Image (cartoon, rainbow, N blue to C red):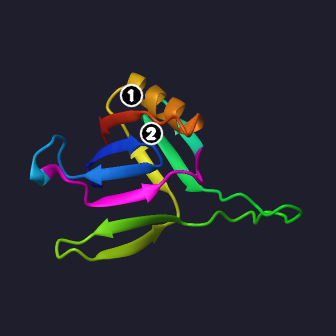
Amino acid sequence: QYHVWASLCHIFLFFAAVPGTEVCSAPFCLTDVRDLRVTQVDPAARTLTLRRVPPAPSGVMRSSRPDPVRFVMLLSDGRWQEVSRPELNIQVNTESELQGWVANLFHYPAGTRQEVAV
């Protein structure tokens, strides 16, 4: 289990090792939230689960199996690498932070910036 800082900014969810504006706090990973949906919320554990649910073309049934969540890992030499995971689990420190994340992700595109340690 890793702890990172997450920032929701328009259509992107950025991940950094530390918060702030210093060079060491630059994001190392990002994902596009347009097709992500909150699929589970556990208030007791202060966690939410996101899965990728792309829109189905008109007249086509969507698969019952969700697509993987795709992340772009920013490598230190300027290259990038795509990494996929079945889902993204986010755990926050407080119930109010959980409510803020759920509200922002349910009402996408909010165009707001939400930062919490996860």
The label on residue 110 is: none
Q: Total marks drawn?
A: 2
Picture quarter containing residue 75?
A: bottom left
Residue bounds of the magenta highlight: 25-38
Residue at 11 percent across and 52 percent down: it is 23
Corner quadrant of residue 97: top left
Left or right for 74, reference 42: left
Q: Are marks 2 and 1 in contact (CB under 8 Å)?
A: no
- Out of 79 and 103, give the one closest to the viewer: 79
Q: Which residue is mark 1?
A: 97
Kind of residue sitting beneath label 1: Glu
Measured Cα–Cα span from mark 2 to mark 1: 10 Å
Residue 118 pos. (x, y %): 31, 42
Image position of 106 with respect to 68: above or below: above
Q: Which residue is mark 2?
A: 47
Amino acid type at image mark 2: Thr
* Residue at left offset 85%, top offset 61%: 58
Residue at image location 55% in from the left, 66% down from the top? 68
As for residue 114 lying within the magenta part, the answer is no
- Membership of 33 in magenta stretch: yes
Mark 2 packing: few (<14 Cα in 10 Å), some, or many (20+)? many
Q: x, y percentage for residue 16?
A: 24, 52
Secondary structure of the residue carrying tag 2 is strand
On screen, residue 78 above or below 8: below
SS at badge 1: helix
Residue 44 appears in the figure: no
Q: Nearer the viewer, residue 85 or 15?
A: 15
